[in-house]
Amino acid sequence: MVKNTATQYDVAIVGAGFAGLYLLHRCRQLGLRARVWEKGAGVGGVWYWNRYPGARCDVESMQYCYQFDAELQQEWNWSERYSAQPEILRYAQHVAQRFNLLDGIDFEHTVKHARFDSEQSIWTLTGENGESLTARYCVMATGCLSKPNWPAIEGYDDFSGPVYHTALWPHEGVDFKGKRVAVIGTGSSGIQSIPHIAVDAEALTIFQRTPNYSVPAQNGPLDPTQAATIKANYQALRDSASQKHNAIDGIYSTESALRVSSEERSAEYEKRWNHGGLTFLGAYGDILRDKKANDTAVEFVHEKINSIVNDKMVAKLLMPTNIIGGKRMCVDTDYYATFNRDNVTLIDLNSQPIVRLYSHGLETAITEYLVDIIVIATGFDAMTGALNQMDIRGRSGIALNEKWQHGPSSYLGLAMHDYPNLFTVTGPGSPSVLTNMLPSIEHHVEWITNCIANMKANEHTIIEAEASAEQAWWEHVQEVASVGLKQTTNSWYTGANIKGKPNVFMPYNGGFPQYCKKCEDVVKKDYEGFVKT
C-alpha cells in the first residue's frame, strides 16, 4: 500500500524545469515553505524529456540562461553558440545543485488531480501514486511544450518495430545504423533530428504534411573572447533584450521592406541568413505586419531552398506557402542539404496520407513503406496540454479543462477566476512562446513569489482574479493577435495541430516590454484585477 501523506506548505510547485527550479529558490529566499512535484526522474523539464539527436535551443545560449544570479552568469561557460540538449540539461542540473534545490523536489510524482478547499483555503494535490500534498498556494510550472502530440494513426500496436516520439526520447539513445527509418513530421524536432538520423540510417523516409520555414543556425563553438565580452557587459545585454518585443537581444530594423531596392533587400536578407538565427525576421519592421513585405522574405527563403536542394520537385515540396513568421520559425544545421542524400526520401502526406501502420512499416493511400523504426516528430499539445490533462478544480468544482473548452482565458497568463491561489508560469495569455522563455519565466516567477510574499506579509489568505479582469485581458489578447499576420496561419499558437482544440490565439502578441509594464502597473495599483481576502 502506498503511504498517504499530507504536508502543509506555503507553496506547492508542479514541475522541475527552469520555472520550477527558480520558483523553489525564490520561495526559499522569501522565507516561504515550498515543495516541488516532478513527473520525471530528474530536473530540466523540456530538456529532460527531449533527448532526440540534434535537440538544441533556437535562442543563443548566452541569452537562454538565468540572469537572476550574477555569479551564476559569470561562472557557467557555454561551449557553443547554440548549445545542445545534453549541455542545457547539465546546466539545469548544475543550478539545482548549486542552489541546493534537490532536497525540495519529489521526483516521479505525477499530479492526478488538484482541488481547492474553500473552507480551509488550501490546495490539495493528489498524485497517481496516491500521495497527497497540501499548500496555501499552487503554482503550475508545467511548461508550454510538455504534452506530446501523437498523430491519430491506426495500427500503432501492429507495428513490430519501435516507435519513438521526439518528446519522449529514450535516455540511452537510439541506434539507427543500418536501419530503415520513417520520420513523421517536419516541425522543429523533425528539422533538428533528420540531418542526424540521415547520417546513420540505411534509408530515411520523411513524411511531411506542412513544410516549415527554417533558417540556418550558423552554429559553432562559442568564441571565448566573444563570451568574455558579453560577460563583461552582461547587464547591458539583458537590459537591451528586455526592451525587445521577443526579449531576445539583436538588431531589429524598423524600416519597411517595401521602401528599399530589391538589391538592398536581398543583401540584407543574405546578411541575416549568413548570421543565422531567429533575428532573420528582424530585417525589416513590417515583415509581420504587411503581406507584401512578408512576401519578400518568403521569396528569399524559397530561392535559398531551391539553390540548396538538387531535386527541384523536392525543393518545391519543402517550400511553405503560408507567411513566414506565422509559426515559430525553425533554426537548423544542414536541414535542406540533407535532402540531397541518396538515402533520403520525402513523402507529401497531402498527396498520399498515411492509412495505417502495419507489422513491417507504413501504408499510405498509394503504397507501402518498409521500415524498421518509426520516429514521431509531431510536436506538442502546446500551452494548455499539460494543464488540461490534470484534473484541476477550483472554488466551484468546475474542471479547468471545462472552463477552457472555448479557449484558455486567463488574467495576464498568471491566474484564472474561480481558481483562487492558483498561478501559472508562462500560461496562455502571456508572451511566453513568442519570446526567449528564460526571461519570461524569470519575470513570472518573480511576480508570483512577490505576490505570495505580499499576501503573507499583509495577512491575506486568498487572491483570485476578477471575472471582469480576466475577460477584459483575454479580449485584449485576441485583439492584439488580430493585428498583423501571425493569426493568419494555422499553428500550435492557435491549437490548430490538435483536433477539437479551440481555435484561438493563445500567447500574448503585444510584446514583452508592454506586458511587463502591465504586470508592474497591476502591482502598483494594489493588484488591480484581483480580489484579496
Image (spheres, rainbow, N blue to C red):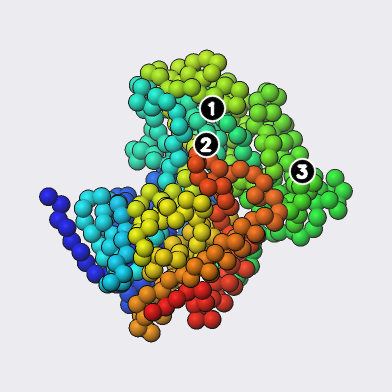
Mark 1 or 2 closer to N-term? 2
The reply to whether discs 1 and 3 touch (Cβ–Cβ < 8 Å) is no
Placement of 216 over or under 515, stated as above or below: above
Q: Which residue is mark 1?
A: 206
Q: Residues within 10 Å of mark 3 (few under 14, many from 20)?
A: some
Q: Residue furthest left?
A: 1
Q: Nearer the viewer, residue 473 or 31?
A: 473
In front of the other: label 2 or label 3? Answer: 3
Q: CA distance from mark 2 to mark 3?
A: 25 Å
| Residue at (67, 55) in percent of width and height | 482
Mark 2 or 3 closer to N-term? 2
The reply to whether discs 1 and 2 touch (Cβ–Cβ < 8 Å) is yes
Q: Nearer the viewer, residue 362 or 197?
A: 362
Residue 31: image quadrant is bottom left
Residue 416: image quadrant is bottom left
Tally of numbered tags: 3
Q: Residue furthest front?
A: 396
Q: Which residue is mark 2?
A: 190
Please tell me the numbered disc located at residue 295.
Answer: 3
The answer to whether residue 95 is seen in the rendering is no
Q: Amino acid at mark 2?
A: Gly
Q: CA distance from mark 1 to mark 2?
A: 9 Å
Mark 1 or 3 closer to N-term? 1
| Residue at (46, 70) in percent of width and height | 465
The answer to whether residue 507 is seen in the rendering is yes
Q: Secondary structure at mark 1?
A: strand
Q: Position of residue 464 (x, y in %)?
A: 43, 71
Q: CA distance from mark 1 to mark 3?
A: 27 Å
Q: Residues within 10 Å of mark 1 (few under 14, many from 20)?
A: many
Q: Position of residue 385 (x, y in %)?
A: 44, 49
Q: Give the side of residue 152 with respect to residue 321, left or right.
A: left
